[in-house]
Image (tube, rainbow, N blue to C red):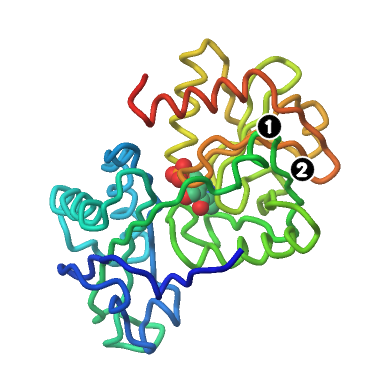
Amino acid sequence: MSIIPFDDRDGTIWLDGEMVPWRDAKTHTLTHGLHYASMVFEGERAYGGTIFKSREHTERLRQSCQYLDFDMPYSDDEFEAVKQQVLAENNITDGYIRAFCWRGSEMMAISAQQTTTHVAVAAWAWPSYFDPETKMKGITLDIAEWKRPSTESAPVHAKAAGLYMICTLSKHKAERNGFNDALMLDYRGYIAEATGANVFFLMDDGKLHTPEADCFLNGITRRTVIDLAREEGLEVIERHMMPEEMAKARECFLTGTAAEVTPVSRIGDYHFTPGNLTKSLVQGYDDLVNGRR
Ligand SMILES: Cc1ncc(COP(=O)(O)O)c(C=O)c1O
């Protein structure tokens, strides 16, 4: 598969209030966001021209900025219009939207009180995070060595670039070991999430269990799927889960804007068979985001 670099594509990116040609959407090498990870972002998806839970994503972007001690300089209404404009300019009805904010280059040191905040929005067609054939059979996850940090060690509820350092390292190791992704535990040894998605288990009690999101992103898709499952009459339990408990899980799946609902067939030495519940939630989520529900 040949790679089309992200800086060499046709299209238009919205950058600091202007639509600019894709290849010219640049920032200086001496940018605080690049050197000190003062950067936050959103990943969103549009289905048939409508961005799913767009305002919730904008709200989370604003909160992520606040966690990193800067302000998002656009109102919710302004930003909604920007995202729609980016989709329209790039002729995208079904695709992925990346909205992001970072500190500029006025200061290049730990203290960054005088930096300006930059904001950009890009969008591109992106069908499925995992290739569709692998997806329905279930993907495989290695168990990562890196642990999600505590709320005392990092602003864990921000969708911030710096928090992805251990995700990339974990995913690379998993891929080198022949897995699709990695499951991360938290600093206490509880199951946390995958490198870019939340995780759910159908346990042998017939209930859906998912780790309590107390030190990692409480995903918008996670919350949506909890609601969907409850609507289908399923009991959903959010709690701390130990990795050994996976021996009692019948089905497992990931949730995320990019991953949507992705069945999992294996985590480390634990095996699962994507079954009726997973399939019905894959379908239910697809119906919901496409306005059929
Ligand atoms: C680390 C991490 N956890 C969870 C999620 C799922 O969040 P959401 O459903 O809001 O996309 C994502 C995806 O953005 C993520 O990167």
In the figure, is residue 243 to the left or right of 201?
Answer: right
Q: What residue would you read off at disc 1?
A: 252
Residue 158 image-quadrant placement: bottom left
Residue 218 visible (yes or no):
no
Give the numbered dot on residue 49: none
Q: What residue would you read off at disc 2?
A: 267
Residue located at (77% from left, 64% from top): 176
Can you give x and y, in whole percent of width and height, for residue 212 in the image? 57, 36
Can you give x and y, in whole percent of width and height, for residue 54 in the image? 29, 42
Residue located at (67% from left, 42% from top): 134
The residue closer to the viewer here, 186 or 199, is 199
In the displayed structure, would residue 228 be above or below residue 168? above
On-image quarter of the N terminus? bottom right
Discs 2, 1 touching: Cβ within 8 Å: yes
In the figure, is residue 13 to the left or right of 246?
Answer: left
In the displayed structure, would residue 148 be above or below residue 271? below
